[in-house]
Image (spheres, rainbow, N blue to C red):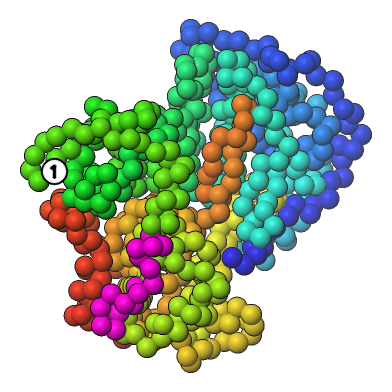
Amino acid sequence: MKSLLLLAATICCACCSSMQPKHHPDYSVSSGFTLDSLDARDPQVIENLGVTCRVWGYVKYHHPVFADSTLNVDYELFGLLPQVAKATPAKRNKVLSEWVKGLGRFSTDKAEYDEALKTVKCTRTADLLWMDDSARLGNVLPRLLRELRYAKREANRYTDFTANAGNFVMRNESTAGSSDDCGYRMLFLFRFWNVIEYFSPNRNLTDTPWSEIPEKYIPLFIPGQTPGNPNQAMLLRELCDSHSALVRYNMFGYNTVPAEVRNAEDRVFVIADGPLRKGDEILSIDSRGWKSTHDGLARFEAASNAENRNYMTAMCMVCSHRDTAAVELVRDGRRLTERIATRSVMDWSPYITERMLDTANIRMVADGIGYMTGVNYTKADGARIMEKFRDTKALIVDLRCYPREFMIFDFIGRYFMPRTSPHVIWLAPTGALPGVFHELQDSLFVNPDNPAVAENPDYYKGRVIVLVDSSTQSQAEYTAMAFQATPRCTIVGTQTAGADGNISALVMPGGDFGYFSGLGVLYPDGTNTQRAGVRIDVPVYATVPGLQAGRDEILEKALEIIATGAYDPAAKI
């Protein structure tokens, strides 16, 4: 991936330099803030905390004082919470206004920001209209917040961006705190919401509007947590991002029945022989069937789309907390139960990759038709692979897996592109204005070693058929998109996971807490791939009869369209 333009906040800070380090109470053991179940049902408490969540997070990422460690922004919140939680609206607004004023004076220069931003195309995701609600916030607080937007400031100590891609990195965030502490629960919710509000390019793609999340979850976070912190899991689920999937193994077990499975019509089938047979239908594991597995995931696990959640359900159907699982299945029309020794999920996943290397190797699947998987490619083998397939009429690239190595530029660009062409638009956060993302168009170069070379007359002339399904996620999706920039590519299969772009880690009270997609990934025409997945030219869904018979219907369709010449984009060349 080419380096993205990272618009750093180079607006110099001209104030707050005289602010002295503040001595807070020792909040490391306890925030000292408590509320009870009655408060969780008090509309004024909910409103006060919702306003505080927004103001605190906005100030955290905008005020020049947070360029260094002079103030601890978490402890600032703990100082505010007791003052605002049960206050009248007027008192709350006064407390928050005085807090902002007390952080130090600052100067502004909107023209300088406008000048810095006008060289790039920007997309704004954060919703700042709440700041203009004078009926709720009064007259003083909105004015202070609007001025902060264009304050002169140095880089914020809580924000950073990766060097190559430019996605957001949480920096200098404390993991201290217990979910038994109400103040730390509020900190968890407030920190989480504001990170997504200002640094997720997909903030506007959630099912629940992101602006509604604080008021939805504050009543859930006020009472003490139950074991497993389900409210935190449900909050992560709200991202609707398969990169954020985190809790499935906690729910269903870190062991798995050693069986490769796929789903069709809310049913699960074995697709490779092992302890179970190809074509077996799994009805339940330890008495847990499809519905309870699916419903549990729908409540607690993030997924970008319904197809990917169904795929997750199939994967979790074979998970177990036990060393030996009771597997209820149907084989050859007979219903039976077998006890199968399980394996660690962490051991099983690498085994699947190794098996694919052994059984799905680089080969000819029919006369003049080559086949390879993303697992087969390495940069060292790229030239050898193309030598084998150079004169074939078609090449099938199976991306129903995670590529072993990055193949975008050194393989697809070098061997499949007749000329250098754009293939993706990235959305990356700016450092200057939180909630603003800049666009960068990236290209596939025919010669990655010498980008000045614009054409390659020796590119692969045959058809390229790319196979995808709901397991095609992240780098695999980006690889499919890159192939779509080549002249004769056809995508065959099922909707992909819809989770692309480099991931950003969530650092929360209590420790690391999963990830979110930190870059937006769009086609050159601006079509978003997040949640939607890559464009499918020939949709193919697994069927119950097909899985019962052990067929690979997606591969079969690929061979069919090669034989018939259907869906060949050759006319576009």
Q: In which quarter of the image is residue 534?
A: bottom left
Query: Residue lying farthest right?
Result: 18
> Would you call the spot at circle 1 few (<14 residues within 10 Å), some (14-19), or many (20 or more)?
some
Q: In this view, does 160 lie above or below 132?
A: below
Where, quadrant-wise, is the N terminus in this rendering?
A: bottom right
Q: Which one is in front, 501 or 60?
A: 501
Residue 51 in view of the camera: no
Q: Can you identify the residue that label 1 sits on?
A: 331
Q: In this view, does 266 lie to the left or right of 59?
A: left
* Amino acid type, label 1: Arg
Could you say where residue 470 lies in the image, as x and y percent from the top left?
A: 34, 53
Q: Residue at x 70, y 34 (%)?
A: 173
Asked if the stretch drawn in magenta spans residue 358, the answer is yes
Q: Which one is in front, 385 or 294?
A: 385
Could you say where residue 72 lies in the image, as x and y percent from the top left?
A: 77, 28
Q: Is residue 480 above or below residue 127?
A: below
Start-end of magenta stretch? 356-371
Query: Residue lying farthest bottom?
Result: 457
Q: In this view, does 57 lie above or below 404?
A: above
Asked if the stretch drawn in magenta spans residue 24, the answer is no
Residue 106 in view of the camera: yes
Q: Which one is in front, 126 or 380?
A: 380
Q: Residue at x 39, y 43 (%)?
A: 303
Q: Quadrant of residue 362?
A: bottom left
Q: Which residue is drawn at 65% across and 64% down?
A: 3
Could you say where residue 109 lies in the image, as x and y percent from the top left?
A: 78, 50
Q: Is residue 322 left or right of residue 382?
A: left
Q: Which residue is drawn at 29% across and 58% down?
A: 494
Q: Is residue 194 left or right of residue 174?
A: left
Where, quadrant-wise, is the C terminus in this rendering?
A: bottom left
> Mark 1 falls on what kind of element?
strand
Q: In this view, does 112 lie to the left or right of 494?
A: right
